[in-house]
Image (cartoon, rainbow, N blue to C red):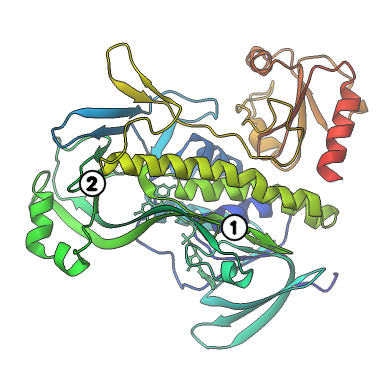
Amino acid sequence: MNNLDFDVVIVGLGPTGGTLANLLAMNNVSVLILEKEANIYNLPRAVHFDDEIMRVFQTIGITKSLSKKLIINKGTKFIDDNGELLLDWPRPKKITENGWYPSYRFHQPDLERSLRYNLKKYKNVATVQNAQVYKTVNKKNYVEVNYKNTKTNKIYSLKSKYIIGCDGANSFLRNEINSEMENLGFEQRWAVIDVILKRKKKDLPDRTIQYCSQFRPATYCRNVGKRRRWEIALKDNESSNTFFKEKSLWKFLSRWVTPDDVHIERKTIYKFQSAIAKKWRKGRIFLVGDAAHLTPPFMGQGMCAGIRDASNLAWKISISCQKGHNEQLLDTYQSERVSNVRDYIKTAMKMGELLNSIGGSKVSDTVFIQPDGSIKMNTIKPKLGKGLGNPKDSNRGKIFPSFKNELEKDIDVLYSCEPILITNRKVNKKEFPIKTFDIKDIPKIDMILKKFKSNALILRPDRYVFASSNEKDLVKFSKSSIDQIYN
Ligand SMILES: Cc1cc2nc3c(=O)[nH]c(=O)nc-3n(C[C@H](O)[C@H](O)[C@H](O)COP(=O)(O)OP(=O)(O)OC[C@H]3O[C@@H](n4cnc5c(N)ncnc54)[C@H](O)[C@@H]3O)c2cc1C
C-alpha cells in the first residue's frame, strides 16, 4: 500500500468533483483529479442551489468570493394557460437553520472557477486536464487508473486507494462497474435558451415561472445579472432545426422579449431524465453526482444532489484513508444517499407532470391549501436513508442547524473533519473520546437541543445527526457512538 501514487483519484472536475476534491483536501487526503476537457465548460447548466449547499460551500471556504456573484432567489410560481396560479413555492428572504438564504441563483462557470481556484491552496491536490480515463482495475487493496492525454495520446497508469467517478451523466466509471440505471419514468426533450439582456426589462418576472400547459410547457428563470433563461418542452416532431429557426424561436420568445431586448448566448436541447444507478460502488470505485443519478431540473436539485453525495462520502473516504479501509462505513454511502435523492427526483417528476398539465398541484407532502384558498409548497427536507446509527433514534439522519461557538466562530468550519458531541450539560471534556461542546451558555443551542428532545447529540462531519441521547452517562454514549463510526 505504501507505493501508491495518491489516496484518491477523482475522475471529472465538474461541480461535484470540485466540491469533493476540496472536502478531501481539507482532511489531508492526497488527491489527483483527472479531467478530459482542457477548460471549464463555459456555458451554464445549473442556475440554482439551496441553503444546505451554501453551507457545504461555507465549509470549503468559497462563500466570500461566490457571494458577490449570487442573487437570492424569490421562489417559483406555477401558472396555467390562463395565467391562474396553480402552486406557489415561495423562498422567503430569511436566514434558514443552515445559516443562509433558502435559495440562490448562480452562473455555473462562476462556481466551477471558485472551486478550482480554492484547490490551488492545497499542496496535496494535483489536477491534470486533457486526461481521459479509459480503463480502471479494481484490486483488493488498491485501484489502478489508466488515462490518455488527449493532446499527445500519451498513456499513463497510476495506483490509488480509491477512484471516485464524478464523470457526469454519461459516466465511463458507471460502465466500468457494470451499474445499470433504474429508469424512474420521466423522459422529455426540452430546448434551453440562455439570453443576456441588452437593456432593462422591468416587466420580466423577478422569480421562476413554470408555465403549465398541455400544449407548450415552459420555464422562465430570472438568473444572475443580465442573464435570463427559457426552457421549453419540445413536441415529438420538433428537432433543433425546426424549433431554433429564427422565425419560430422569436415567435416563442415574443411573449416576453424581442431581438432588441436580448442577445441569445446559447440555445441547445437536453433530454430531461429521471434515473438512479443501481450500484454506486464496486470495491474501491465509487460514483458521485450525475454519474449516480439524473433528475429533471424543475426543482433545481440535480447538482445539489451531487454536492450532498460529495459531502456524505468525503469524510467516510477520509477516515478510510487515514485509519484503514472501512468496508462497513463506506457501504453506508449509497444507502444513506439513495432515498434522499429519490425523494427529490420523485418531487421533480411530479412538478414535471404539473408542468405538462397531466398532474395536480399536490407535488409533495409539503403542499398546503392556505386560508385564502391559494396552494403553497414548503421546501422538502428528506432525511438520510438507512445507514450509520440507530434507525429507532428519530433524530438520526436529520440535518443539524448551523451554529457558532461562544467565540462566534462557525462550528461547521472549525470542526468539519470529525464528529463532535454537543450537550447542554456541564461535563468534563477530558473524559470524552470525541471533541465535546457543553454549551449551556448559548441559548440558541439549548433551544435547538430541546427541539430535538435531547440533552446530547453526536454530529457527523457532514452535520447530519448521528445519534441523540438523554442518557446520564454521556461518556458511555459517546464511546459506543465512536465505536460504531470507526468500528
Ligand atoms: C438545463 C439544465 C438545468 C439545470 N439546472 C440545475 C439547477 O438549477 N440546479 C441544480 O442543482 N442542477 C441543475 N442541473 C443539473 C446540473 O447541471 C448537473 O447535475 C451537474 O452539472 C452535474 O455535475 P457533475 O459534476 O456530477 O457532472 P458534470 O458537470 O457533467 O461533470 C462531469 C465532468 O467529468 C468529465 N469527464 C467525463 N468523462 C471523463 C473521463 N472518462 N475522463 C476524465 N474526465 C471525464 C467531463 O468532462 C466533466 O467535466 C441542470 C441541468 C440542466 C441540463
* Furthest residue toward bottom: 153
How many marks are shown on the rendered structure? 2
Residue 135 image-quadrant placement = bottom right
Dot 2: within a 10 Å radius of its alpha carbon, few (fewer than 14), some, or many (20 or more) residues?
Answer: many
Question: Where residue 410 appears, x then y in whole percent?
Answer: 63, 30
The secondary element bearing badge 1 is classed as: loop
Residue that numbered label 2 is attached to: 218
The secondary element bearing badge 2 is classed as: strand
Query: Is residue 185 placed above or below 452 in the rendered structure?
Result: below
- For the N terminus, which image quadrant? bottom right
Depth check, front residue: 270 or 438: 270
Q: Amino acid at mark 1?
A: Lys
Query: At 43% across and 64% down in the image, what residue appears?
Result: 40
Q: Could you tell whether 118 is left or right of 350 in the image?
A: right
Q: Amino acid at mark 2?
A: Ala
Query: Is residue 72 placed above or below 44 in the rendered structure?
Result: above
Query: At 13% across and 46% down in the image, what residue appears?
Result: 199
Query: Is residue 163 placed above or below 352 in the rendered structure?
Result: below
Q: Could you tell whether 362 is left or right of 192 in the image?
A: right
Marks 1/2: CA distance? 31 Å
- For the C terminus, which image quadrant? top right
Q: Could you tell whether 484 is left or right of 449 in the image?
A: right
Q: Quadrant of ligand 1?
A: bottom left
